[in-house]
Amino acid sequence: MTEILLSSEAFIKSVSSISDNVAGKYILPSLREAQEIGLRGILGDCLLDALKERKAAGQLVDQYLELVQRCQYYLAYATIVEVAQKVTYKVGNFGVTKSTDENLQVASQVEVSDMRFYYQAKADACCRGIQRWLLNNRAAFPELRDCDCAAIRANLYSAASCGIWLGGPRGRERRRWR
């Protein structure tokens, strides 16, 4: 089956500080992870698969098109979080390495972590916007009723991606799914 990505390398480069010289071999796997792990956790299997099927068939219209458009910045920022580590450190025959150049200064691990934290916070903010919009428009998506939404309910109420236990499933208040 052909891989369907809901965003593109060009869009990610256009809205971020990623250099135009960064190869797709770093960006595309990072985009794939952002979509298939991060976005899947927010939308659930059925809705993400429906978006991909509709895009492949050229039938991405109405609410589905709007949802994909709302996911663009989340995907861009989540991709940057992943790509930062990939371009900083490489795994090779000699082990884990980082490249240096006489004209460039390689960022420290702390600086890379700070950058990743910055973009993760932006991705979390975008995630929260997607969640609010999806909750307000859930009637337009039969996939949210067809699937077992228990798996994504917590992700529809909290966009936190920190390492602190927030109490219960993602720290959300107990609300009834309607």
Image (spheres, rainbow, N blue to C red):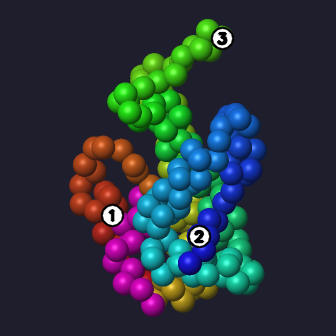
As drawn, 173 above or below 47: above
Residue 121 visible within the image: no
Residue 104 percent location from the top left of the image: 62, 14
Q: Which residue is mark 3?
A: 103
Q: Which residue is mark 1?
A: 173
Q: Considering depth in this image, is 120 or 1 the residue closer to the camera?
A: 1
User: Is 71 a magenta residue?
Assistant: no
Labelled pair 3, 2 in contact (Cβ < 8 Å): no
Element marked by disc 2: loop
Labelled pair 1, 3 in contact (Cβ < 8 Å): no
Q: Which mark is residue 3?
A: 2
> Would you call the spot at circle 3 few (<14 residues within 10 Å), some (14-19), or many (20 or more)?
few
Q: What amino acid does circle 3 point to?
A: Asn
Q: What amino acid does circle 1 point to?
A: Glu
Q: Which residue is drawn at the image coordinates 39% and 80% (left, top)? A: 149
Residue 152 percent location from the top left of the image: 39, 71
Choose the circle earlier in sequence order: 2 or 1: 2
Magenta stretch: dominant secondary structure: helix
Q: Considering depth in this image, is 19 or 168 the residue closer to the camera?
A: 19
Q: What amino acid does circle 2 point to?
A: Glu
Element marked by disc 1: loop
Q: Considering depth in this image, is 155 or 61 the residue closer to the camera?
A: 61
In the rendered image, the quadrant that contains the N terminus is: bottom right
Q: Which residue is at the far front?
A: 93
Q: Which residues are magenta?
A: 146-158
> Would you call the spot at circle 2 few (<14 residues within 10 Å), some (14-19), or many (20 or more)?
few
Q: Which residue is drawn at the image coordinates 39% and 49% (left, top)? A: 161
